[in-house]
Image: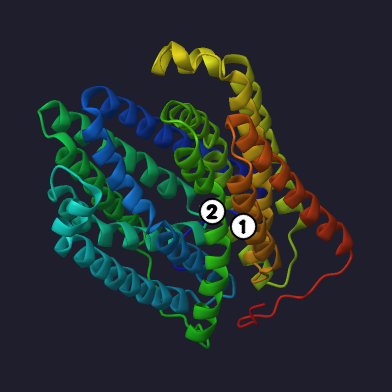
Amino acid sequence: MRPDGERTTSTGRGLATGGSMLAAAMLVANAGNYLLSLFLGRVLTPAEFSDANLMVTTLFGLTSVALCLQLVAVRFIARSDELGFPGDSDLLARRLRRVALVSGAVAGLALGLGAPWWSATFQTASPWPFVILAAGIPFWLVQAVERGVLQARLRFAPLALSFVVEMVTRVGIGVLIVSLGGGVPGATVALSASFVATYAVVRVANSSRSDRTGDGISLAEVRAYAGLVSVLLIGQIIVNNSDIFVAKAFLTPTEAGVYAAVALVGRAVFFLAWSVATVVFPVVARRHAAGRESPEVVRTGIAAVVGIGVVCTAGALWIGGPVLAAVLGPAYGGLSVPMAAYAGTTTLFAVGNLVASYRLSQSRATESWLLLCASLVQLVLLLVWHRDMAALIAVQSITMAVLVTVLGARALAGRGTTTPARAPQEAVS
């Protein structure tokens, strides 16, 4: 059942259309953000560009909070809507918005009031970018909840629009202000303004209200589930960022810069694959709430992720080096092979992440723990074998291949056994 006045499409064709729309929007958004980074790299001095990157890195430190709020919203709102109690969903959404607002305000105050100290610690030219970013953080966390509501209700059109609006606002304001001499503060204004614009879009889209309520959503269950979500997100953060830090710590500055370029392009695979997980997660959560299993959904999702990975890997091998040479300079022209290898490795991780998020949508966290363990093993191996870029990529490829093999073996071992969904309230395991 759906909230009053809301129309969602859960057919295979509707999901394919919505997923394709979301993937295209995320591709456009990431391409725009990448172009903005290139613009800043060309216009700003190296020191200024470093300060601008620090603002983005600071924001990434709160990514786990934002995604945790979003996935919790998806899981419980999808379940309540499917069971015919959208009033419970609306109540939970309001509570999560308050949590996001309070968390954003606390983080913003810590960043803004401590701006002089942060500036001195990280040797930035001015403390003002920290203050400007602090103003946008509450909007960023609240819009994560709003996106979770749209995702739960399979409203992929406004969700896709939110990514495009975020990118257009950021690029448009960033290019304008920086071109007029705004420097790093101007780039940070664009970053914070994009959060406000995104919040406006998703808040307007989430206008449905209903008084139909059930037994309510257990806050203890929500907190327990948030803990499980954090396991998956911590694993994601370690896998997606540990190699960059190791490269910067142990490779020469030039080698680390080249590796960063390879990783930046290769990670496009993960962000495209995340659009698939964005579609799969709420669909499975709804079916699980209704007592139905969804093996065909995850199989289709895995096929889509592998397809994305194959296309990106082949493209990197064929034209990756020439494209980088044209954009960044001739020093990057010989990177087709490592780019393809990195894209293939990221595909393996994206498959493992999809399986873990699929099981997490059913409140089953074993796969998330396996992904976290794999991320820690990978980190240890990177700290041991880091002599060059090839070694870094090889370590990740081996670790992710083992992870996917273990997940596959676990799925085969469990084939034929199903656990009925318990609704409206179920144990989190």
Amino acid of disc 1 = Leu
Q: How are the colours assigned in the image? A: rainbow
**Closer to us: 399 or 384:** 384
Is 257 located above or below residue 60 in the figure? above
Q: Position of residue 108 (x, y in %)?
A: 23, 63
Q: In the rendered structure, are the residues bearing label 2 and label 1 in contact, judged by CB atoms less than 8 Å apart?
A: yes
First in sequence: mark 2 or mark 1?
2
Residue for point 68% across, 34% down = 307
**Who's the residue at 46% across and 80% down the image?**
212
**Kind of element beneath mark 2:** helix
* Three-letter amino acid code of the residue under disc 2: Ile
Location of residue 420 in the rendering, given as x and y in whole percent from the top left corner: 77, 75
Q: Work out which residue is located at the far bottom of the displayed protein and give it.
A: 215
- How far across and down, in percent of the image, does residue 251 sit? 49, 34
Q: Which residue is mark 2?
A: 238
Q: Position of residue 352 (x, y in %)?
A: 68, 51
The answer to whether residue 34 is seen in the rendering is yes
Q: Is residue 44 above or below residue 410?
A: above
Which residue is the site of mark 1?
A: 376
49 horizontally vs 393: left or right: left
